[in-house]
Image (cartoon, grey):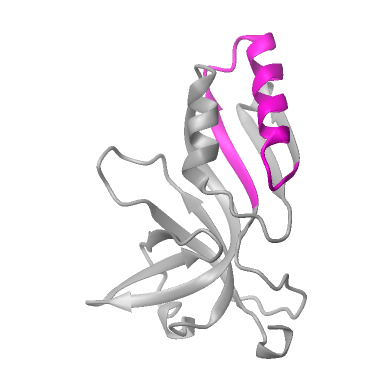
Amino acid sequence: MLLYSSAFALHGEILSLNITISGMDCASCVTGLETKLKRMRGVQSAELKPEKNLAILQLLEGNTIRLERIRDEIKGVGFTPKEAVIAALGRASQEHGIWSFTVEGTNQKFLLSPLEPGIARHLNPGKLIRIESLQPTPAPNMEPTLELKSLSAVPSNVL
């Protein structure tokens, strides 16, 4: 699905994050993690829903939070971060036929795989885009990967 919109922030960043978390069976640990996430610089709001094994974060414009930092906070209280659905601004690039997405402001890079048929033709290397994607649970010693669900071009007149 390809979406276009002209309402975008001016910075590259992760905009929102819904992350599945296993092991949220300790109520005080859930409260502690929610407090830690809310106190992270760049987090606008954080809500944990232990009954759904889910954390929902909205991030501030201009944040430089890296996804692995949020995962580390979750691990730090004894929970296990799993797959995440993210919305982010950044730029796509292609090298040796392999597409990647870099979140600006963090330079965090993700491989884009698999791309739905026809979606790659809408990726313009170097142009700012907004994506919504799924990040499967990261495998040890593997490059982080995003499964692209949608992308939107950011009009050049808002840059």
* Towards the viewer: 103 or 26: 103
Horizontally, is 12 left or right of 119 in the view? Answer: right
Q: Quadrant of the C terminus?
A: bottom right
Residue 63 lies, with reference to residue 112, above or below; the image says: above
Horizontally, is 26 left or right of 23 in the view? Answer: right
Residue 4 location (% of width, % of height): 67, 80
Q: Is residue 133 magenta?
A: no
Q: Quadrant of the N terminus?
A: bottom right
Q: Quadrant of residue 45?
A: top right
Using the rendered image of the protein, determine whether residue 1 is visible from the camera's viewpoint. no
Q: Is residue 24 magenta?
A: yes
Residue 126 location (% of width, % of height): 46, 82
Q: Residue at x 41, y 79 (%)?
A: 120
Residue 80 location (% of width, % of height): 47, 25
Q: Residue at x 42, y 70 (%)?
A: 116
* Towards the viewer: 104 or 85: 104
Q: Quadrant of residue 62?
A: bottom right
Please provide the residue range marked out in magenta: 16-44
Q: Residue at x 65, y 27 (%)?
A: 52
Q: Residue at x 60, y 11 (%)?
A: 25
